[in-house]
Amino acid sequence: MKKIQIILTSLVAAFLLGANSFAASGNIYVSKSSVYVGDTFSVSVSITSSAAWNIHVTASGPVSGCTINAADATADAKDTNKTFTSSCKATGAGTITLSLSGDVTSASNGNAVYLSGSRTVTVTKKPSSDTGGNTGGNTGGNTGGNTGGNTGGNTGGNKPTTGSNKKPTSTKSTNNKLKSISVDGYSLTKVNDNNYKLKVTHDIESVNVKATAADAKAKVSGTGKHNIKDGKNTIVVTITSESGAKNYINLTVTRKDGFYLEDLDYIIAKKINNADIIVGGDTKVSSSDIAKMKDSGMTFKLIYSNQSKRLISGWVIDGSKIEKQKDFNTAVSFNSEYRKEILKLSNYADGLIVSTHTPPDGAKLRLYVGDKFEDGNLVNLYSYSQNELKTVGEKIEVRNGIIELDAADSNTYFLTMSSIAGAKTEPKEVAETDSQKEDNNGPIIAIIVGALAATLLSAIVIFIIIAKKKKKQTEEPEMPETPQSNPFNFS
């Protein structure tokens, strides 16, 4: 029964160990917990099940050396176990504190595990060498049994003691503490006394670090301008006390791999036109952000890409064309609830169905279609609404696997190289040129001129008729009056 219990216990332990073997971890160790002044010892960090690591060990107190800064990853991207060691030397009596910080990442889940921990080492002065002298002198004197023996023994034995106790005491300061640390233009986040962090935007290529020691006699190194790259950058500032004891301050600067919506105010303030803004597959752009884009009048590119940074879908938003300021979801789907109707209307043409949310006014949709079409292919664009397909774009060229479309008044589209019979043409507003305006005004001007000419001609005709009538009346002779007989005339 006892053997069975042992076997079961072993199996359970093995299972538990196996279950945790995939969790990345790290611990700090010291070779000695107490030493004498001048002694050396080592500090080690052991990491397990880690494919990437960024670890730091800093020391405070009467010690030199004792620092570890290791940031790397396995070449094959597989988990491994590693140990990092540094040599330390105790420079004075007191307590040495060793602090672990950083993180490790396992390939099994890709999650970073933050590391922390500390170890202390007690430093004391070496014991005096007087004991041997006193013992020898006293023993010899007492054994001789006479005052001379004692006097000689004690005198001889005690003299070394007096000399060995006159060890000079150092007056140099061991203070290697940090008073302040800063980066021009930014506010740092403090993790602990030896670790600080900062996040900056993608366009920042360098930072300027400033630091001050608590003791004016201590020296500070590692400050000034530091170039940074995408991802985590570790900057180490070293404070060296007057006695030589070093204290290491770790500043982790993380530079973003691109601009995000949270950087919109910064982009507008810096007037970074056509900035690529990274979004997710269904990022919601608030109406307030749309309003900011409108007010700026700038153009913004919302980019959704895969892990290889290949575009999946994106939107080009021209702030100068925005009228309505409403929330907008960037999600794009390559399917639709109207799939059957679209295929039937297209006579089952080979193509690609795309569904979107209603974009801001004047927005353009950018899609990766390299899985369906080849570079150079000319694609026709149809919008679907109310069981009807409308032509909204023709012979749109595929370039680098990407096609750019003008978003129509629809949320559902069909892309195909075929021409769909029966599809209606979406009316487009075309700006009139000056010549076109003249052509459009031509008929109107002709009508007006014709009307005026007709009126003038009518007036002339009427005038002529009236003139002729008057002339005729003037030329006609007057008839003499016929005398009438007067019955009352007697002559």
Image (spheres, grey):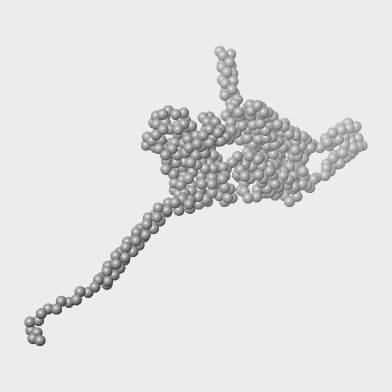
Above or below, 180 relative to 384 = below
Residue 158 occupies quadrant: top right
Q: Position of residue 272 (x, y in %)?
A: 58, 48
The answer, for residue 369, to whether it is visible in the render is yes
> In the displayed image of the protein, which residue is found farthest to the bottom?
491
Q: Quadrant of the C terminus?
A: bottom left
Q: Position of residue 474 (x, y in %)?
A: 27, 72
Residue 467 occupies quadrant: bottom left
Q: Quadrant of the N terminus?
A: top right
Q: Position of residue 9 (x, y in %)?
A: 57, 19
* Left or right: 409, with 264 as reference point: left
The answer, for residue 26, to whether it is visible in the render is no
Q: Position of residue 434 (x, y in %)?
A: 48, 53
Residue at 79% over, 37% down: 38
Above or below, 474 relative to 93 = below
> In the displayed image of the protein, which residue is found farthest to the front?
491
* Image mark count: 0
Q: Nearer the viewer, residue 365 or 44?
A: 365
Q: Nearer the viewer, residue 112 or 254?
A: 254
* Left or right: 215, with 436 as reference point: right
Residue at 47% over, 35% down: 380
Q: Nearer the viewer, residue 458 or 18?
A: 458
Residue 140 occupies quadrant: top right
Residue at 46% over, 50% down: 436
Q: Nearer the viewer, residue 365 or 137?
A: 365
Residue at 40% over, 37% down: 424
